[in-house]
Amino acid sequence: MVQEAQAMELPVIVSDVGGIKFGLLPNESGFVIKEGDIDAFAKAVEKLILNPNLKAKMGKNGRGFVCTFFDSRVLVSKLLSIYYRA
C-alpha cells in the first residue's frame, strides 16, 4: 500500500516496524515514526496538513521513487535478468 499511495503522489507515514520503512524515502516522500509514538504520528499528519507545498513535494518525490524502483516494467526487467543469469 505504501508504493500505491506514493504512486498517486501521496506522502506516506509509516512506523519503523519491519521492512515497510524501506519502501519510501524518509523525510523526502514521507515520514518514518517510532512504533507506538502517537504524538509523532499526529505531528507528521499536522505538518502535512499545514504545509501543502511540503505535501506536494513529498508526493512528487514518492511518485518518482516508485516509478524508478517499483514500476512493473522495472521489476520484470530485473526478474528476467536474474533468470537469464541462472
Image (cartoon, rainbow, N blue to C red):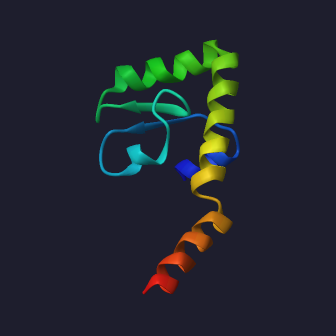
Q: Nearer the viewer, residue 80 or 66?
A: 80
Residue 1 x/y as whole percent:
54, 53
| Residue 59, quarter of the rendered image | top right
Vertical position of residue 79 compared to residue 3: above or below? below
Residue at x 40% of width, y 33% of height: 32
How many labels were placed on the picture?
A: 0
Residue 67 x/y as whole percent:
66, 51
Residue 55 x/y as whole percent:
64, 24
Residue at x 52% of width, y 32% of height: 30
Residue 13 x/y as whole percent:
48, 34
Residue 55 placement, left or right of 32: right
Vertical position of residue 39 compared to residue 26: above or below? above
Q: Nearer the viewer, residue 41 or 55?
A: 55
Residue at x 40% of width, y 49% of height: 20
Q: Nearer the viewer, residue 34 or 76?
A: 76
Vertical position of residue 67 compared to residue 54: above or below? below
Residue at x 61% of width, y 39% of height: 62
Vertical position of residue 79 compared to residue 39: above or below? below
Residue 11 placement, left or right of 83: right
Furthest toward the front, the residue is 85
Residue 55 placement, left or right of 82: right
